[in-house]
Image (cartoon, rainbow, N blue to C red):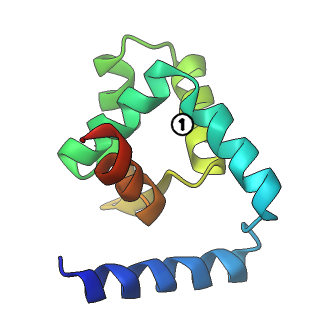
Amino acid sequence: MGTSELLKRKQEWLERLKKEGKLRDPTEDHKMGLIALQNRTRREIIKFIGIGGKRSFDEIKKKFNLTDAQAKMHLDLLEQALFIESAEEDGKKYYILTPRGEAYLENVEWR
């Protein structure tokens, strides 16, 4: 994906977040991001989703040997911090990276 396509995708994502009321003030947003990234399992979940493009709850749970409650806690926190989002395909829920999650992998994790 080219730079202009990435910028367009990010702008569309930000507009959608505004409409859905998910954007927070920058201080709260940074705090939430730091909380999410302090945990190694959550950082590894971001990488796992990034490698596969999309992952189901069960795939994530199995890969990291998590209980349902543990997987839900990690995924909910990553969603709240806007690193991942859920999407439905053929009636099944998947988790995908947001532009923020992709930027984390590109600029921090995979360097």
Local secondary structure at mark 1: helix
Q: Position of residue 26 (x, y in %)?
A: 76, 62
Q: How far across and how far down the image is residue 31, in percent?
A: 74, 43
**Depth order, front residue of 15/87:** 15
Amino acid tagged 1: Leu
Which residue is drawn at the image coordinates 30% and 61% (left, top)? 90
Q: Quadrant of residue 36?
A: top right
Query: Which residue bears the numbered disc 1?
Result: 75
Nearest to the observer: residue 32 or residue 84: 32
Of 18 and 6, the residue lying toward us: 6
Classify 52 as above or below 99.
Answer: above
Residue 82 visible in rendering:
yes
- Please identify the quarter of the rendering in which residue 15 is found: bottom right
Mark 1 is surrounded, within 10 Å at the Cα level, by few (under 14), some (14 to 19) or many (20 or more) other residues, namely many
Residue 94: x percent and y percent? Answer: 37, 50
Quarter placement of the N terminus = bottom left
